Image (tube, rainbow, N blue to C red):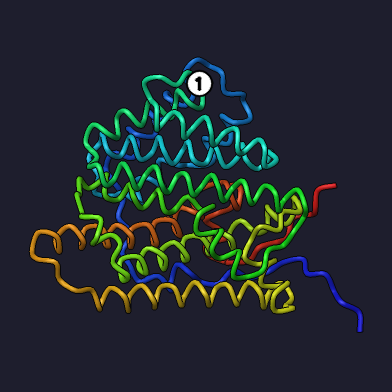
């Protein structure tokens, strides 16, 4: 029997699977303008990066995932997310030594902001960090640095896999992907964006950790589905779909459907965990509710933004959202 190479696949209907309402921050246009000015300051971003920035629509993402943030907090969140995408684009073209060098610059800029002289990426780091720590609690600051450190360790490992053209096993991939996504740091910013000060022991509670994981998995695995077409065209195998194809010996469409089911299970897990939360007293319960509402905003917001951005589907995102049909791009030579 002749095996036929697929030319298209159908996306799972993840937007319908996610039951949470979409909210959009009223400061979206203003932060988009200000972040653009910050990113392009000094006119030293090449035109290719500028075009990517406009198509990314990061201000829309920030407005959807931090919908209740006041302007100063939303601006820091949008600066960070834009900068994280910029780092992600940079790291795509780096080997593991390059990502380690970038990590050193960024983390030294956070740990020693007053004394570390650094290139542009370090200056940008220090700039948003100064604004963040002016209102962020010590717990938020610590969690921000720790999770960003995990992000760099994992993208270094990812760069090594890319050099070797290695497809990781399923368990290793899931653990690594929870860090390469940048979600852990982005979720810390839910606390910052809403002026929360939740004690460490509450944030470390098994159910809160499980809620974070479930939200991370939905954002991350849905992103793997949406980004698969562009990544397969470049030969990038650090994606849940090739991992599942390899692990379960599946063809493309069954693998996409399988990952779609995993996404649905992560929503079910989130709802189940939320229903079982204990009480820590009125004030902490109030803050925990705001935080978990923020995880819901991240889940639904990231899904809708993926079709607004040009990062995955070019200018055809809204059409893809309706039809869910993806025509496979040819592989780059």
- Residue hosting label 1: 118
The residue nearer to you, when weighing 86 against 121, is: 121
Q: Is residue 43 above or below residue 66?
A: above
Identify the residue at image location x=65%, y=43%.
Answer: 92
Residue 127's spot in the image, x, y percent? 38, 25
**Picture quadrant where residue 236 is located:** bottom right
Residue at the location (44% across, 53% down)? 183
Label 1, secondary structure: give it.
loop
Q: Nearer the viewer, residue 42 or 24?
A: 42
- The residue nearer to you, when weighing 210 against 9, is 210
Residue plotted at (60% across, 38% down): 100
Q: Quadrant of the N terminus?
A: bottom right
Say whether residue 10 is left or right of residue 278: right
Q: Position of residue 60 (x, y in %)?
A: 40, 45
Q: How packed is label 1: few (under 14 Cα within 10 Å), some, or many (20 or more)?
A: some
Q: Position of residue 310 (x, y in %)?
A: 56, 46
């Amino acid at each position: 029997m002749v095996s036929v190479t697929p030319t298209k696949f159908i996306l799972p209907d993840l937007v319908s699977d996610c039951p949470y309402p979409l909210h959009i921050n009223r400061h979206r246009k203003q932060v988009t303008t200000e972040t653009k000015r910050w990113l392009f300051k000094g006119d030293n971003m090449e035109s290719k990066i500028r075009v990517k920035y406009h198509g990314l629509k990061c201000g829309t993402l920030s407005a959807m995932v931090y919908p209740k943030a006041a302007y100063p907090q939303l601006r820091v969140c949008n600066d960070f997310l834009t900068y994280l995408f910029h780092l992600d684009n940079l790291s795509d073209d780096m080997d593991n030594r390059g990502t380690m060098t970038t990590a050193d610059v960024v983390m030294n800029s956070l740990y020693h902001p007053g004394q570390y002289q650094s290139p542009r990426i370090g200056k940008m780091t220090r700039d948003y960090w100064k604004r963040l720590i002016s209102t962020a609690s010590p717990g938020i600051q610590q969690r921000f640095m720790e999770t960003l450190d995990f992000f760099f360790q994992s993208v270094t490992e990812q760069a090594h896999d890319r050099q070797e053209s290695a497809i990781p096993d399923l368990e290793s991939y899931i653990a690594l992907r929870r860090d390469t996504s940048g979600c852990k740091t982005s979720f810390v910013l839910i606390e910052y964006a809403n002026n929360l000060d939740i004690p460490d022991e509450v944030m470390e509670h098994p159910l809160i950790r499980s809620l974070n994981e479930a939200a991370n998995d939905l954002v991350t695995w849905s992103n793997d589905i949406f980004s698969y077409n562009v990544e397969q065209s470049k030969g990038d195998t650090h994606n849940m779909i090739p991992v599942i194809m390899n692990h379960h010996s599946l063809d493309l469409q069954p693998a996409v459907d399988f990952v779609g089911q995993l996404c649905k299970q992560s929503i079910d897990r989130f709802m189940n965990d939320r229903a079982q939360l204990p009480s820590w007293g009125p004030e902490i319960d109030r803050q925990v509710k705001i935080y978990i509402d923020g995880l819901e905003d991240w889940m639904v917001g990231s899904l809708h933004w993926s079709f607004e951005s040009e990062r995955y589907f070019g200018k055809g995102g809204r059409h893809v959202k309706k039809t869910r049909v993806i025509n496979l791009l040819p592989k780059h030579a």
